[in-house]
Structures are given as C-alpha cells and as structure tokens.
Amino acid sequence: MSDELTFEDRVLVATVTLTGDAPLPLGEFISELDVAAAVAGLLGVDEPFVRSEAFGNSKQRLQLLAGMQELEDQGLLKSLGTMGSNPVAPTSSGRARVRELRAREERTQHARLTEARTRVLDELKEVREYAALDLRHLGRAGITMDIYEAALKALVDEGVIERSRKPGPLLRSEWRLTSTGRAQVGDAGARSGDAGWREAAKLKRQLELLQQEPAALIRDAELRRRCVDLLTAEGDHDRAVREACVVLESRVRVAIGAGDDAIGTALMEQAFSPKAPKLRLSTVEQEQLGAMQIYRGVMAYYRNPTGHRVRDDFEREEALRIVAWIDHLLLLIARTIGRA
C-alpha cells in the first residue's frame, strides 16, 4: 500500500488482510498482537519485540491502541477492549474502506504507469539509434524507478520499444522505438487532441489530485464515490461542491429522521439547535451554537448558490478543499451518532 496512507488506514488494511474480506464468525476477534506484528515495521520495531513482554508497556503499543481507538470511533473497527489485550475485528464499513483504499491504490498505480509510459516515449521519440534514458530527468517527475521499470516491460511486451543487446540493468540499458512505436508516437503527435491523449491527461490530473491527499483527504466513502470523478474533470468543479453539499444534507436528514421536506438551513437549525439538538456536538451551548452556524453556513454559502445557478469560479484545488471540509463535517456527525 502507498506511503500516503494514514497510520490508521494502514492498521485497518493490516487487520482486514489478517481477517479476510468476509466477516468473522459471530463473537470471533483477532489478537491485538497479531495486528501489531503485521504493522511492526510501521511502529518502528520488529516482530520479536511485539511478541515480548516489553511491548505491553511500550509507547509503540500505545500508538497502536490510539490508532485502533480512532478506527473504532469512526465505526471501522470493533474491539472487546478487555483488560491487558484488545482483540479486534473490522466492521463492514471497515472492510468497505479497505476495498476503496485498494481500488484507489490501483487507480494511482495506473495513473503513474500511464505517466511513466508517456515520459519514456517522449524521451525516445527523437532517437533513431539506441540511447540510454535520462534517469535524472525522469526522476524529477516524482515517479519511482520501479514504475519506470514496469512501464518499460509493458512497452516491450506491446512491441513499442526495443532494447539493445548490451547487457545491463533494465533502467541502464539502451532503447529505441520500434516501427510500431514510431508510428504510435507520430499518430499521437499529429492528433494531440484525440481520446487517448485526453485520457492520459485525465489520469495525470487524477495522479496530481491523489498526491494532494496524502492523509486520505476525502475519507467518507459516499463522498469519494460521488465527488472524485467531478474533481478530476477538466472543468465545472462547482458540480463537486454541489454534490458534496447534497451528501451532507442527506446525511443530516437521515441522522435525525427528518422528512424529505426538511432541507437547507432549516434542516441544520433543526439538527444542531443549541437549545434542543438532535445531533449534539458539544455540551457547551455556545459551542453547539457555533456548530449549528457552521453547518447552516455551508448550506447558505455553498449549497444554495451551487444548487440554483452555475458557478464557474471554482478552481479544482478550491473545490477539493471545500469537499474535504464537508468530509470533516460528515466525520463529526458519524462520531456523534457513534456516541448516541
């Protein structure tokens, strides 16, 4: 899994890997130590230390328990919380989260591989004889060398490039385009606006977007499903803001059992009213009032304008920040429901 995942996400992935994608039989859990052993490297220790008595009172165990507690607060993990140990099991939401993380990782790798292929072809398109790749230039793109190796192997398999007979490591070898490759590059250059290059540009934007969320910026599954494709589109990013606001509105409506006629600012006042809140975020009345004003403000400032007219003034990065903020508001609701 990518290093861009949060500590909690990596613990969750390790737990699901241990238990499998199917739910555990009723009442069954896995040992905290088994999870700790699976993420020993992440904790900066080795498995023998995890299995030793010293681990029980170590800061590494406290770090693991804090991550597990965060996952439990989000409804992604459940635990027995017994004295001296903490047997755990992923919830259905936790397993779904891992499936999404794996799918995102696959999309990220695909985008990186596509970008690496494009860069290799750009390096070789003016070459007539065999030539080595400029690894320093390629490295500045932020793509790892193992991705370039995978790209080279794929291009060879497709008959697009060929390797000289000189022995040596793959990345240090000399390469040139085949006649098929020259035709492909020529076609692409002559038709720079065709569907293939548009798809490559979109994948590049997706990669850039994913690189902007090193801490799983949009954590809510429904929000990601409905908004990421809108955020990676060429324009009209007000659609992502509009969709995110609708998800928030719908989530609040379901959480308090309101009817479909409860909408917008009135819905938020009903849900978060400091006098008699149905969703209590704070026991301090002024803080609860502040929460209501935040949720009400999102409806008034973002939901209503994007819901009633086209907004062309949202750049991709700005829309991403707004969607990420709404993601945080959804998390607060989830935690409130979890405490109820």
Image (spheres, rainbow, N blue to C red):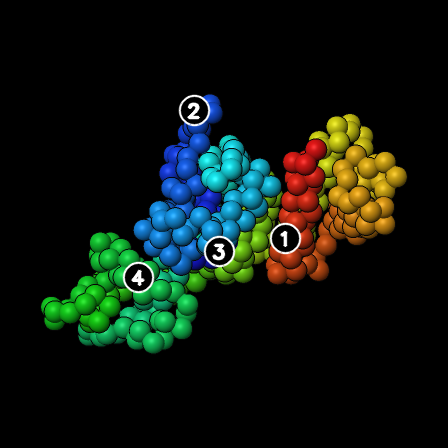
Say which residue appears at 36% left-offset and 49% top-offset.
52
Say whether disc 3 or disc 4 marks the residue closer to the N-terminus.
Answer: 3
Q: Closer to the camera: disc 2 or disc 4?
A: 2
Say which residue appears at 78% left-offset and 27% top-offset.
259
Q: Is residue 25 left or right of residue 78?
A: left
Residue assigned mark 1: 324
Neighbour tally class for label 1: few under 14, some 14-19, many 20 plus, Cα within 10 Å:
many
Q: Callout 3, which amino acid?
A: Lys
Disc ID at residue 146: 4
Q: Nearer the viewer, residue 328 or 49?
A: 49
Please tell me whether residue 248 is drawn above or below residue 318 in the rendered image. above
Residue assigned mark 3: 59
CA distance separating discs 1 and 3: 31 Å
**Residue 273 in sight here:** yes
Rendering coords of residue 104 (x, y %): 46, 48
Question: Decide: marks 2, 4 in contact (CB < 8 A)?
Answer: no
